[in-house]
Each structure stands twice: as structure tokens, then as C-alpha cells.
Amino acid sequence: MKDHVFRLLIFIIISQTKLFGQSENMVFIQGSRYIPLYGRDSTVVEVKDFEMDIFPVTNVQFLEFVKQYPKWQKSKALKLFTDQSYLLNWKNDFELNDTEKQNSPVTYVSWFAAKDYCECQGKRLPTIDEWEYAAMADQTSRDARLKPEYNKQILAWYETPKTNENLIGKNQKNVWGVYDLHGLVWEWTLDFNSVLITGESRKDVDKDNNLFCGSAAVNATDLMNYAAFMRYAIRGSLKAKYAMKNLGFRCVKDTKPQP
Amino acid sequence: MKILKIITIFALLTFTFSSCNSNKSKQGTILYLCPMQCEGNKTYNQPFNCPICKMDLQPLETSASKIENTDGISEESIFNLTSNWNTEEGEQILLKDLKGKTLVMVMIYTSCKAACPRLVADMRNIEAQIPDNKIDQLNFVLISIDSKTDTPERLKSFAIENYMDDPQWTFLQGTETGVREFANVLAVKYKQISPIDFSHSNIISIFNPKGELIHQQEGLGVDNTETIDAILRLTN
């Protein structure tokens, strides 16, 4: 009898970890210290261990979400949290335009919607530092930023139109096992609003106004990384209620301390 | 056998608590109301016909939006935010509790040495130009970016030091996510540079008593005539 109970206990513990501990469609990213494109006083940032979604969130996943949380349906989302472009490529609350594919990344979503999506899955949006850290890997190395092919590939994507209509998972996965950080859509980050460059940066920000004026190039720690430069520029220009055709998101999660 | 039961119950409980705290319960209870309101606001749980005029009952809006309607909050109102805040007096409030007064809001942090003193001076400048008989229609709200350091006690002493302890001044401490969300509503950008230092946009925002954004003044020490005009237009 005791044996039986014990076995059951083991079974429950295992099924629990399967369900909640190790997350479906996420991979473990081992944290480290690195120098992002733009650092100021302390140029090295530390990223803790985390788990990241293998794919960006897709149209069909977002559809499931709005079914469960009506406040994010196209017709119900508050204007405080979305602009007119929110889910622009959807026919109505529950249908995409016929030209859209279920497994394309969801776009035309605001930061508020993306943030809520992740929180309702028990996850969160990645920070800029986490996202950049995972995205500096290529197929074979964790930091490929000095490889000319790495930068060339990303810039080639930036030149390709309408990649947001492609399906997820068609690009090569990187060394962590994450797909489509480059090559499909831009992605929301939790603290995108910490990039202090707006149209009015010269007057409304006290210290960070030199990122894109003359001295900017000197401050950027990796002159080669033009692609990352563009990502920071985009983040600096975003507002949280904006929805854009080529801006989607994926979620991450803090890893639980290993027992 | 008892142990087995306990384990099962424990497992079930864990599963329940692990699920996201969604608004499922709200979805379950759709209420139906006669479109002619023959019986006033009487509602039904099932889509019957109205017993008086025999018309089909119509589903009410979800309970969430019903609350908004009764509160008279529009879609663009910041009172839709549900984050919790502490005031310098140690009270816990929602932004909704600020409803009814014209709000002049700015984000600062008290250990700031560079821009914030000037921003605070800008706020005091604006306040000084409002006629005394209108001041009770206004609420000047200073929200801390540094939710870790700026405790209610610290905000209170900052208020006293800066002669901003009158009732028209409110200081708020939020949570890290609450602050980020609110900054995004105001389109304020900020970045923590060191444990005690932040970079941030210098924006003063004016909201009408319903929490809708009316005007934003960007920059330090700029001409505040427009801002004051905007405030005066909102007061009687």
C-alpha cells in the first residue's frame, strides 16, 4: 500500500513538472554577461537564466487568446491600450482576413496586448537585454555578432518586404533552439520604452540625447552591428499603443531554481 | 488510503492555483435584459422572452464594460488601469480614486539630482499660476519612477522639503510593472542607469476629471502658457 502511494506521489510530481516546470515550446537560455550595442556607465549587462518561446506568437494562438479574454477582441480593446491599427488584418473579432495564414506571426498588436498575452500564460515579455542576448546567436555560436555573414543575413532580411506574411519556423533555428528572432517580424520587448530616443529627444530627455546625434556612433559599442542599431532606433520610436504590420512578439519566463 | 486522498486534493489545489487568474468567472455569467426594459433593469440568466412584451431578451454587455459604463469612464481614460499605488500619506489607491479633479501629472524620482528638481520647479510654477479659488479643482500628481527607493515615507519627506505638502499635491509609489505600464500610457521613456539614477523624458501631462489626456508639455523650463491655458479650460 505504502509503495502504491509513493508511486502515485512520484507520478504526480512528474506530471506537475511536465505541465508547469518545463514549459512546452520553450527552450532554456543560459544567462551570461555581455556588452549590448549600447551601454553607458556599465557597458556589460548581466542576463539571468530564462526560458524563451521557440516561435513568435502566431495568429491562431492570438485568436485563442482573444476568445478567452474578450477585452482584447478587435472591437472591444480600449483606445487607451490600442490605436486604430490594432488587428487591422482581421475581418472581425474572431476571423482573420482570408489572405492571412494561421501560422504566421501575429502582428498589429500593441505592447499592452502583448504584455497581457504573456502574463495570462504565466510568462512575460523579454527585456531588451534578454532579447538581444538570445538574438546575437547564430546556428553555431552564442555570440555571432562579429561574423560578417550574421550581419549580412539580418540586413538582407531588413531589405525583404512582407516577411510578416511568412510562416513561423521556416528560418534556421539558432544555437539555443530559438526560431525567427531574425527574418520574420520585429518583436516587442518589456522595457522598449527605456530606449530614450524620440523625435523630441533633444528637449524632453535629460541625458540620453546623444545616442543618435553625432557622438552616437562613438558611444555605440559595436560599430559593425548596424542591424542592432536599427532595432534600437525602432524601439525608441514606438509608443505602447502602436500596432504595426511587422511588429509581433514572443514571451519568456524566469527559470525556476533547479531543485 | 487517506494519504491518497490528501495527495489528490493537494494536487488538485496546486493545479487550480497554477492557472492564470483570468476573468473566466465573468464570462460564465451572461445576463439578459428585455430590450424595452418592461421590468426596468430586471435581468435573467437565460435568453427567455420578456414575460410582458414577449420580445427576445438581449444579452447585456460583459460585466467589465458594465462597470465602466456606470462609472462613466471612457475608453481613453487612464482610470481603466487597475494597478495599485501608495500615496505619500500611506494610503492604497487605484488611479480611479483620483477621478473628479483635473490632473496634472509628472514622473520623477526623489534621489534625482539633474532634471527632476527642474521638473518639480516647473510643476510648482504651474501651480503658482492657478488662481487660489480654482486650486481645489486640481490635483498635482507626482509619480515615482523609482518604486524601490521612493517609499511613502520618503515621498512624504520630499513633499515637506519642497513645500508640496498641501492637499492639492499627491505623490504615488507603484509597482515596477505598474510604473512601466503607466509610463507607457503617458509615452514617458525611462531607463535605470545605476541603482539610484534614471534617465527619463520630461513630460507634464494634463488629464480632465474623467482621466482623458488633454495636453502634454515636453521639455524642461519651457513656456508653460499653453499648459496653463489647458488647465484653466478644464476648470470652472
Image (cartoon, rainbow, N blue to C red):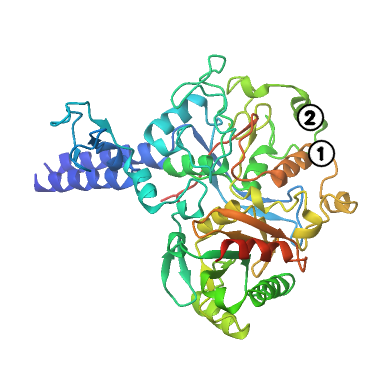
Does B102 sit above or below residue A37? below
Q: Quadrant of residue A19?
A: top left
How dense is the environment of label 2, judged by Cα within 10 Å: few (below 14), some, or many (20 and up)? some
What is the secondary structure assignment of the residue under circle 1? Answer: helix
Label located before the other in sequence (1 or 2): 2
Mark 1 belongs to which subunit?
A
Compare residues A14 and A226 and report the one nearer the observer.
A226
How dense is the environment of label 1, judged by Cα within 10 Å: few (below 14), some, or many (20 and up)? some
Residue sitting at x 21%, y 26%: B55
Residue under label 2, please give it.
A155
Q: Quadrant of residue B32?
A: top left
Residue sitting at x 72%, y 47%: A236
Contact (CB < 8 A) between labels 1 and 2? yes
Task: Report how many numbered discs are placed on residues in the image.
Answer: 2
Query: Is residue A17 in view from this perspective?
Result: yes
Residue under label 1, please give it.
A226
Residue A184: x and y, percent? 65, 26
Residue sitting at x 69%, y 32%: A138
Compare residues B15 and B27 and report the one nearer the observer.
B27
Mark 2 belongs to which subunit?
A
What is the secondary structure assignment of the residue under circle 2? Answer: helix
Residue sitting at x 55%, y 77%: B133
Does B69 sit above or below residue A25? below
Q: Are marks 1 and 2 on the same chain?
A: yes
Residue B116: x and y, percent? 69, 71
Q: Is residue B203 left or right of residue A55?
A: right
